[in-house]
Image: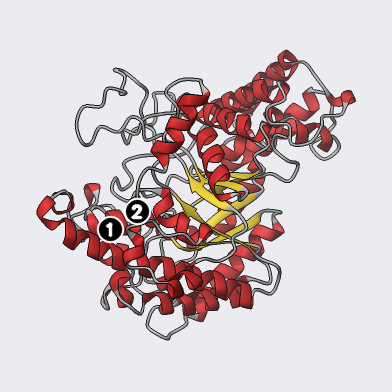
Amino acid sequence: MGFSADFLWGAATAAYQVEGAYREDGKGMGIWDALYPGHVLHNDNGNVACDQYHRFREDIAIMKSLGLKAYRFSVSWPRVMPGEGTVNRAGLAYYSRLVDALLEAGIEPMVTLFHWNLPMWVHEKGGWGWDGVSEAFRDYARVVTEALSDRVTYWMTLNEPCCFIGLGYMLGLHAPFEGSTASWNDPGKREENQKRLGVLTRNTLLAHGKAVQEIRLHAKKPPKVGLALNGTLYGPRADTPEAVEEARMRTFAGDGNFGDVHWWADPMILGRPTPIQQGFLTEADLRVIHRKLDFFGYNSYHLSNFGDDAGTNPEVRPGMPRTAMDWPITPEALRWASRFFYDRYNLPILITENGMANCDFVMHDGHVHDPQRTEYIRGYLAGLKKTADEGVPVIGYGTDELPAFYTRQSGFGVDYRIDTPEDLAAAFKAQNDLQLGGFLVTNPIPEEYAMDKAVIDAAIDQAIKESKEQGIKGKETTPFLLARVAELTGGDSLASNIQLVYNNAALTAKTAAAYCKL
């Protein structure tokens, strides 16, 4: 089966991490805007961030040059509704311009309604613990749907409730920085903690269900609706059916808790609460929560096998590769995520985020070299391809690496991007190895366009050499490379040899460079 011709190769961001303009054009304050001081490394903030609010057209031009087919962005709730019952038309107009520009560039807009920056007016009423939050979210979902659904097909209600509830309200690591790890782990507070988690979970699930209902009621074109989850995922310890089933059982073990995918997905998708949830979810609640979804979105960075927060883990190997955020690098994660979640929920799989934070800095030659990230992406996609080949409907992949964006606890201390022509060429070549092996072929390559890997690599090297000699830099680099490599491999120009350049991702970055930024 593999990746289909309409596979959504894309990138993902969050409003607070990239937009900036935190007090412009009527935007209200969100919890990340107001509460970050003292909680983020170096006291970094998203006040300016990547300044996408002002520079989105430049960003989209880069996306187009890289061949992205989709861009998942989040709408800022406090930008659209800065006060209770108040709609900021200037905020909505920004997202309308963004959607128009994406469509004009041939890029599918994918909207996430909530990616963590709760309006302060909601927070002051109790945040996700307020019994009116799901109705407020319903109103917000309707406003955004009415404004954008004539052009937007793909909708996600929430991003990672595991994090904004668990880390935000139970462990105190994310905004609004309530609770603490010590309190959560205190046996004497278990009952209190579970009661609070029940309230937060119920409100979040109801908000999701009401938002799905609003999207389907008010969408002006047929919508595809889901959400972006994350959470516990175990991989097998050995390549045996028994090991696979053990990993599946570990992934969905027991009643679950806020860090487990099934804590959120079972009520939403199966209409089935866990035994613990039966204590706070009623049948009436489930009729709201359990709504038809069109895909299962999952943010995947690593397997859970190698966690050692609670003490020594015998599965942790000395010297195993890790990211700059100390997350283990486990290329098989996408394979088992797509396999296990499709088997349980029977929905097409959309990888809504994947990527790595790297220790990037400018080298003596003025460049930021990035071979680790190229290898990371190649390995993770190889795992995803295995499951797609087995018949699992995988509809898209979104890298969390388009801009160098603000990271919630680490500020701007980590980087998620590729920067230089040399590293872009390395990404081209790495993807070319896979392409010519049948890995990233999203359409059959016509026989007359097939060519030897050595020819492609030589053309890439020559194009890079010429770009240096001619002093070509920045945004001009990618178009030059694409056109020059097409010429060197038999085409007069990018336009006149579009079939070749579309099907050979190594040449054109239609696939490979979707994960790169010059």
Q: Quadrant of the C terminus?
A: top right
* Picture residue at 35% right of the left edge, 72% below the top: 119
| Coloration of the structure image | secondary structure
Task: Inspect the image, locate mark 2, and give the three-letter code of the amino acid beneath it.
Answer: Cys
- Helix or strand or loop: what does disc 1 sit on? helix
Q: Disc 2 designates what residue?
A: 163
Q: Residue furthest right?
A: 448
User: Residue 108, labelled with which disc?
Assistant: none
Left or right for 310, reference 225: left
N-terminal of the two: label 1 or label 2?
A: 2
Q: Residue furthest left?
A: 188
- Helix or strand or loop: what does disc 2 sit on? helix
Q: Position of residue 510 (x, y in %)?
A: 68, 38
Residue 369 visible, this angle: no
- Residue 434, by quadrant, is top right
Q: Position of residue 450 (x, y in %)?
A: 82, 22
Residue 97 visible, this angle: yes
Left or right for 144, reference 321: right
Q: Are marks 1 and 2 in contact (CB under 8 Å)?
A: yes
* Picture residue at 55% right of the left edge, 40% below the top: 338
Q: Position of residue 110 (x, y in %)?
A: 59, 58
Q: Please name whichever residue, 341 or 122, is drawn nearer the observer in this view of the structure.
A: 341
Q: Disc 1 designates what residue?
A: 168
Task: Inspect the image, locate mark 1, and give the three-letter code of the amino acid beneath it.
Answer: Gly
Above or below: residue 209 compared with residue 394: below
Q: Position of residue 94 (x, y in %)?
A: 54, 70
